[in-house]
Image (cartoon, grey):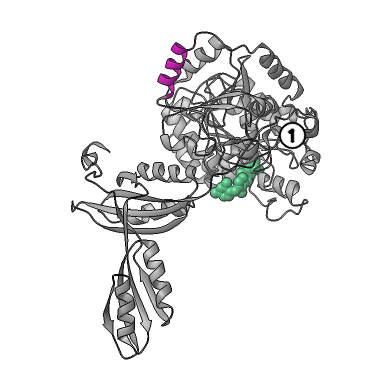
């Protein structure tokens, strides 16, 4: 198993990772910062592991017997409880910072160096691929058993996953996605297909709400010819909404999609899941209409409620040459699954609230 | 509540046999093995500039390393200060503390001293009692001396290893100890070995 972290992208080791993984036919899981380091369209790609990772990735990382972690800190959002993290695996840790070695997870084989060079050297040293037909079949079975699914809406309320997925189908392959923090961030990670490095721009586990609006501006300025989409939550969007004026001033062609559940949804989800539904300061129906707010800034605003209008609204927002904001009114009760509770066993991810109660 | 994905429930899935301990080390689940904490003396050469102490102590508190003592003072070179940090941590914690210290820009060099390194601490004890002579003779037993006396209290100075000072404090209890101040350890390796000062130029 290969676990690719954000370090793979930082050290420009994605091509090397790709040839290494495909040559030896080793399945690849990414961390959240590692999204885009390995094309999710590859057969070997199992997606992201961790708290809201795919079922297949979490089953594989838990049950593998050898794990090559490249450019990853083994952060707690990835590992869950360390007692149950890849407990049968020899860990080969490729990492440039010695302080990360055996900090969270003991490295049986620490390889300190630049990810690209170390992968090259590994490639040169290995003589034959591991015998892993059965393992790859097992991974494929998990992928079938645990698809990322959601209810297809034919009526309101609109499902956020559907908005992300539809946008993904319409957007350029190398479009850059930025996010705030919360449920929308997880849906953007899960339901968009990442195939290029540096197309996922997020504060990841650091959890900086408000990151989405300004980072989209930065992304657009850094890559003016690339499509930039920001998926934001209503809470996160309000934290840095004033930056819209910069996007208007510079006339930056960015599409903002506020997945508006009138709530700090991730907080509400935890209150529902772990505090018997006692909702406290997590629901916010008293928020502005974001399409009108956008217009007030001089950007274009769109309101999206009806599942039937998803495509045309996205199309119109993409076509507008300048900052556009789609206020997507989504199902306020929608929650993010799979979910590994904080400190839990990755292999025991919950697929529903009922599972959370079993854990 | 909406949000339910297909797939086998948690209790229907295969689970590995193994386990890791809280330090992320694979263990035999039958024998709970964790590293026991040990004392480690870290000697660090740091740039002698404002803010270094708070950087180092901030690192230790953030990462919750257990500090037993921390002393700072000038070194041979006026631009460099030496910190002696005694921590009590399991082996992985000791290694982490060293690596994390090395990452600080203002830290030039870090070494863990050998157990037989020279460690000295200074203690001042204010002891109650009308008989300065008795107090002085106990002080002498520990190689110390009275440095101040008033009508009903004597202040004694003692230098030595932690164990020696612990024992001295105990011995003075017969008179009643009013106050103690201890400096924490200052430590140097035995022999002619030193920490490489040339690291200062190359290591940034
Ligand atoms: C600045 C900041 N404050 C608080 C939090 C804690 N927090 C994490 S997710 C979240 C809710 C985010 O709500 P929203 O942006 O509306 O996104 P949603 O979960 O509804 O998609 C909060 C409050 C944080 N990560 N950052």
Q: Is residue B25 visible?
A: yes
Helix or strand or loop: what does disc 1 sit on?
loop
Q: Which residues are magenta?
A: A115-126
Q: Is residue A178 above or below residue A126?
A: below
- Viewport quadrant of the C terminus of chain A: top right
Q: In the depicted view, which residue is nearer to us: B13 or B176?
A: B176
Badge 1: how crowded within 10 Å, few (<14), some, or many (20+)?
Answer: many
Q: Residue at x 49, y 29 (%)?
A: A6
Q: Residue at coordinates 25% horizontally, 44% vertically from top-left?
A: B195
Left or right: A289 in relation to A212: right
On the image, the x and y values in percent for residue B72 come to 30, 58
Q: In the figure, B165 relative to A216: above or below?
A: below
Magenta stretch: residue B70 in it?
no
Quarter residue B100 falls in: top left
- The residue carrying mark 1 is A158
User: Considering only vertical position in the picture, is A234 above or below A36?
Assistant: below
Residue at mark 1: chain = A
**Dominant secondary structure (helix, strand or loop) of the stretch shown in magenta:** helix
Q: Position of residue A110 (x, y in %)?
A: 46, 28
Q: Residue A68: x, y in percent?
A: 54, 24
Quarter of the image where one finds residue B134: bottom left
Q: In the image, A258: left or right of B83? A: right
Using the image as rendered, state which of residue B73 and residue A38 is in the foreground.
B73
Q: Quadrant of residue B192?
A: top left
Q: Is mark 1 within 8 Å of ligand 1?
A: no
Q: Nearer the viewer, residue A201 or B174?
A: B174
Q: Is residue A234 visible?
A: no
Of residues B32 and A51, the one drawn nearer to the viewer in this rendering: B32
Instruction: Name the spot of residue B140 as percent of width and height, x first.
Output: 29, 74
**Quarter of the N terminus of chain A within the rendering:** top right
Q: Give the total of numbered labels.
A: 1
């Amino acid at each position: 198993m290969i676990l690719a972290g954000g370090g793979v992208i930082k050290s420009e080791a994605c091509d090397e990772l790709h040839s290494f993984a495909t040559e030896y036919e080793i399945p690849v899981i990414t961390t959240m910062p590692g999204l885009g380091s390995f094309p999710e369209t590859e057969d070997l790609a199992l997606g992201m592991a961790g708290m809201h990772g795919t079922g297949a990735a979490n089953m594989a990382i838990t049950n593998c017997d050898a794990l090559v972690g490249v450019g990853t800190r083994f952060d707690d959002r990835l590992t869950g409880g360390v007692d149950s993290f890849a407990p049968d695996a020899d860990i080969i840790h490729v990492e440039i910072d010695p302080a990360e070695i055996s900090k969270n997870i003991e490295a049986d084989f620490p390889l300190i160096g630049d990810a690209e060079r170390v992968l090259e050297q590994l490639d040169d040293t290995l003589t034959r691929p591991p015998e892993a037909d059965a393992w790859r079949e097992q991974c494929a079975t998990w992928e079938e058993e645990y698809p990322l699914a959601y209810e297809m809406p034919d009526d309101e309320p609109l499902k956020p996953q559907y908005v992300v997925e539809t946008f993904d189908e319409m957007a350029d392959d190398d479009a850059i996605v930025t996010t705030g923090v919360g449920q929308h961030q997880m849906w953007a990670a899960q339901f968009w297909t990442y195939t290029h490095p540096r197309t996922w721009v997020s504060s990841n586990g650091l959890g900086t709400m408000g990151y989405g609006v300004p980072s989209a501006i930065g992304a657009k300025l850094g890559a003016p010819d690339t499509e930039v989409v920001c998926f934001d939550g209503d809470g996160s969007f309000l934290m840095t909404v004033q930056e819209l004026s910069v996007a208007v001033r510079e006339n930056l062609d960015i599409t903002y999609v506020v997945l508006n559940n009138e709530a700090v949804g991730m907080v509400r989800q935890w209150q529902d899941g772990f505090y018997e539904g006692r909702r406290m300061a997590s629901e916010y129906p008293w928020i502005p209409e974001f399409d009108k707010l956008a217009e007030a800034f001089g950007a274009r605003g769109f309101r999206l409620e009806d599942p039937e209008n998803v495509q045309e609204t996205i199309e119109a927002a993409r076509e507008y040459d300048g900052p556009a904001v789609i206020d997507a009114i989504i199902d306020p009760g929608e929650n993010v699954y799979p979910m590994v509770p904080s400190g839990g066993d990755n292999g025991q991810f919950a697929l529903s609230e009922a599972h959370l109660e079993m854990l | 509540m909406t949000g339910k994905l297909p797939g086998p429930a948690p209790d229907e899935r295969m689970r590995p046999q193994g386990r890791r301990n809280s330090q992320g080390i694979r263990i035999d689940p039958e024998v709970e093995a964790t590293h026991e904490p040990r004392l480690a003396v870290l000697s660090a050469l740091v740039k002698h500039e404002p803010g270094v102490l708070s950087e180092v102590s901030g690192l230790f508190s953030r990462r919750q390393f257990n500090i037993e003592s921390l002393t700072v003072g000038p070194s041979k070179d006026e631009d460099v200060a030496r910190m002696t940090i005694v921590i009590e941590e399991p082996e992985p914690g000791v290694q982490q503390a060293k690596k994390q210290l090395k990452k600080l820009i203002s830290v030039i060099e870090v070494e863990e001293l050998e157990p037989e390194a020279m460690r000295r601490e200074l203690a001042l004890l204010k002891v109650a009692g009308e008989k300065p002579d008795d107090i002085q003779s106990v002080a002498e037993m520990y190689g110390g001396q009275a440095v101040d006396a008033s009508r009903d209290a004597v202040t004694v100075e003692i230098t030595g290893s932690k164990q020696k000072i612990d024992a001295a404090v105990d011995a003075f209890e017969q008179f009643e100890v009013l106050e103690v101040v201890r400096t924490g350890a200052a430590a140097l390796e035995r022999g002619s070995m030193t920490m490489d000062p040339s690291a200062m130029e190359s290591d940034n």
